[in-house]
Image: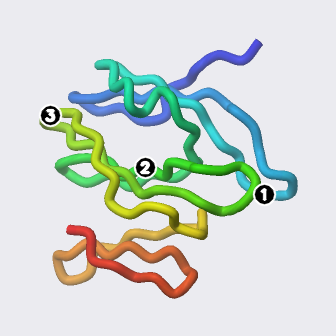
Amino acid sequence: MESYSIYFENSELKIFSIYAGEIRMGPIFLGFKSEPRIQDIETGIYGDWFYKTDSGIYLQKWNSTKEPNADLIFIDFKNLNVQTIKSNITSVNWKIENIAGNLVFNDFSGNEIAIA
C-alpha cells in the first residue's frame, strides 16, 4: 500500500502527495493533502508540476484524465487562500519564467500570459 510523501514544504505549508494514476504513455497525476489543511486542494487531482515564489506556490490542477484540461492555481502562503489564475488550459506541459521582474506563464500551445 502506497503512502503519502512530502511533495513541497516550507515554514508556512507542507503539501503531501500520493500517486493517483497516469495517462498511458504520458504524465502521472497525484492526490494532495496539506498541513495546515486546505480542503480545496484535497479533492482534486494534480500534475507533477509546481512553481514556487516568495509569496506562494502555483499548482497544476487537472480537470480530466482523458484529455489535456487543467487549471493554474495559486496558494498564497500568508493566508493559504487558493486562487484559480487560468482555467481549462489544453496542455499539461507548462513553464513559468521571471522576465524582467514579471512572471510569465507559457503552456506551449500558443498561450503566454503575465500572471504577476
Which residue in the structure is indicated by mark 1? Answer: 26
Q: CA distance from mark 3 to mark 1?
A: 34 Å
As rendered, which of 38 and 1 lies closer to the eye? 38
Spatial distance from mark 2 to mark 3, Cα to Cα? 16 Å
Q: Which mark is residue 79?
A: 3
* Mark 1: secondary structure: loop
Q: Residue furthest left?
A: 78
Residue 100, quarter of picture: bottom left
What x and y, as percent, mark residue 86? 38, 63
Q: Mark 2 — residue?
A: 59
| Viewer-nearest residue: 87 or 57 | 87
Residue that extends furthest to the right in the rendered view of this protein: 24
Q: Secondary structure at mark 2?
A: strand
Pointer 1 local density, CA inside 10 Å: few below 14, some 14–19, many at least 20: few
Which residue, as the protein is rendered here, is positioned at the far top?
Answer: 1
3 and 1 marks in contact (CB < 8 Å): no
Amino acid beneath label 1: Gly
Dot 3 alpha-carbon crowd within 10 angstroms: few under 14, some 14 to 19, many 20 or more: few
Q: Which badge, 2 or 3, is on the more N-terminal residue?
A: 2
Indicate the amino acid at tag 3.
Asn
Determine the residue positioned at 77% across, 12% down.
Answer: 1
Q: Are marks 1 and 2 in contact (CB under 8 Å)?
A: no
